[in-house]
Image (cartoon, rainbow, N blue to C red):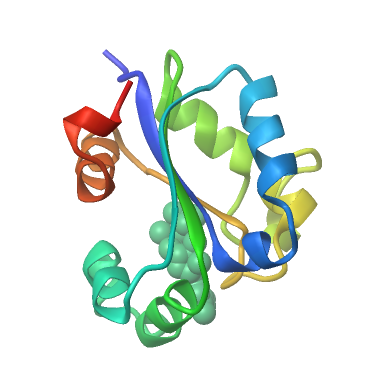
Amino acid sequence: MAGNITFTMIKPDAVEANNIGPILNMINKAGFKIVAMKYMKLSGAQAGQFYAVHKERPFYGELTEYMSNGPIVAAVLSKDNAVADYRKLIGATDPSKAEEGTIRKTFAKSIAANAVHGSDSDENAEIEANFFFSQLERF
Ligand code: GDP
């Protein structure tokens, strides 16, 4: 059965461009509830730990540097079929390939600075939510 939570970050490029509000609006309009949220800045080590699955990829250094370069908004979202529905709402990793109306098509600057993160499986949604939030911070 598909799970009902996913984890997202509004990445430094979208925060810098004052797009926190418009992105949260799209998230709510698409039927997601925000069950946890914080505004924070990751250290290089924390970004490295979060993206450890990408350690072997050529862009790992660039990615962790970029993600620790400015504040982000981390949030847990709930909705039926949350992971798949949120991936659909954010669009393809490369914004030039993302569909019209998606968050990345609307707000992302490049494949690296692509506005938002979205979990890719129910299992990773739980791992990522637990990386950022305690049970006391999830409603
Ligand atoms: P996602 O699940 O759509 O976020 O994509 P991936 O899991 O494949 O990649 C994780 C993140 O790494 C992406 O969201 C981008 O921020 C970054 N990324 C992916 N491909 C590239 C790339 O070719 N170059 C750089 N610099 N960053 C990339």
Q: Quarter-wise, where is residue 114 in the image?
A: bottom right
Relative placement, left or right, of 91 versus 70 is right
Relative placement, left or right, of 88 versus 29 is left
Horizontal and vertical percent position of residue 27: 62, 31
Is residue 13 positioned above or below 139 on the image?
Answer: below
Q: Residue at the location (32% across, 75% down)?
A: 43
Relative placement, left or right, of 97 versus 122 is right
Horizontal and vertical percent position of residue 106: 78, 50
Q: Residue at the location (66% across, 48% down)?
A: 20
Image quarter where the N terminus lies is: top left
Horizontal and vertical percent position of residue 99: 74, 44
Image quarter where the C terminus lies is: top left
Q: Residue at the location (25% across, 77% down)?
A: 55
Is residue 26 positioned above or below 66 on the image?
Answer: above
Q: Quarter-wise, where is residue 50 in the image?
A: bottom left
Horizontal and vertical percent position of residue 134: 19, 38
71 or 51: which is nearer to us? 71
